[in-house]
Image (cartoon, grey):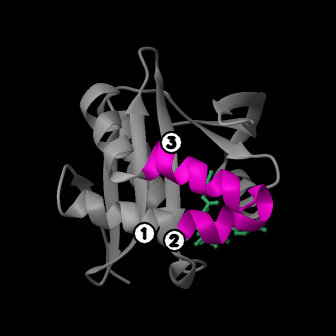
């Protein structure tokens, strides 16, 4: 397995991530949240325009994850003003799950956090996203809080907040 994780800025890589995000989000959230909410969330958070805005104005960094040269996943991170790094996006295409790539992705994030002097990595995860919650727990994350966030359009996100001390 050769996993390559690379910071992504604009075209064409960010467009490729938007296409991948659309596929992964519909696959993993379609049943959980319903098609309408997933369409809304993809447009609001993972469209090319939305990600460009996050990078330019909200201190986000997107990273592509490739195995043997094939784009198979992506990450999104944002440093907070305190000692935390927000792991905003952690996604792998279904054909690439269960083979150690997620652990490599997470180790990369922990290294990034240490490099910029952060002490904690935190994330939000849908309360019913059982597999992701199991993975995060296995890695050593703990639930620190819950959050219900109004994302507009009549939709809410009902999440656990989880944290890992790096
Ligand atoms: C979340 C995601 C990136 C994890 O990737 P993955 O390939 O499924 O993860 P893996 O199966 O490699 O599991 C990672 C680790 O957790 C362990 N694990 C997996 N399922 C587990 C379970 N039910 N109980 C305990 N440990 C478990 C694995 O053994 C592995 O540990 P190891 O590397 O020490 O062997 C991937 O499932 C995904 O993209 N899901 C859809 C999108 C999503 O929900 N993203 C998170 C949004 S918050």
Q: In x, y percent, where is residue 123?
A: 60, 39
- Counting from the top left corner in percent of width and height, residue 56 is at 24, 32
Residue 20: mark: 1
Judge by depth and name the residue closer to the eye, 18 or 76.
18
Q: Check contact, mark 3 vs mark 2: CB within 8 A.
A: no
Q: Which mark is residue 132?
A: none
Asked which secondary structure carries label 2, the reply is helix
Quadrant for residue 164, please give it: top right
Q: Are marks 1 and 2 in contact (CB under 8 Å)?
A: yes
Report helix, strand or loop for mark 3. strand
> Would you call the spot at circle 2 few (<14 residues within 10 Å), some (14-19), or many (20 or more)?
some
Q: Which residues are magenta?
A: 24-46
Q: Looking at the picture, how far across and down is residue 92, in whole percent?
A: 51, 69
Q: Which residue is mark 3?
A: 88
Ligand 1 occupies quarter = bottom right
Q: Nearer the viewer, residue 33 or 102?
A: 33
Estimate the spatial distance between the alpha carbons at disc 1 and disc 2, rounded to whole Å: 5 Å
- How far apart marks 3 and 2 lie (CA) works out to 18 Å
Q: Earlier in the sequence, mark 3 or mark 1?
A: 1
**Residue depicted at 70% across the width and 65% down the height:** 30
- Residue at image coords 67%, 48%: 140
């Amino acid at each position: 397995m050769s996993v390559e994780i690379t910071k992504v800025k604009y075209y064409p890589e960010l467009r490729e991530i938007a296409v991948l995000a659309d596929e992964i989000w519909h696959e993993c959230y379609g049943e959980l949240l319903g098609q309408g909410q997933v369409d809304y969330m993809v447009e609001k958070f993972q469209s090319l325009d939305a990600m460009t805005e996050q990078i330019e104005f909200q201190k986000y960094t997107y990273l592509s994850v490739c195995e043997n040269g094939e784009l198979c996943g992506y990450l999104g991170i944002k440093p907070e003003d305190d000692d935390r790094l927000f792991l905003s996006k952690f996604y792998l295409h279904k054909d690439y799950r269960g083979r150690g790539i997620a652990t490599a992705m997470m180790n990369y994030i922990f290294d990034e956090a240490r490099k910029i002097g952060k002490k904690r990595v935190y994330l939000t995860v849908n309360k019913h996203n059982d597999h992701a919650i199991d993975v995060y727990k296995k890695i050593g994350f703990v639930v620190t809080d819950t959050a219900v966030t109004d994302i507009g359009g009549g939709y809410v996100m009902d999440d656990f907040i989880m944290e890992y001390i790096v």
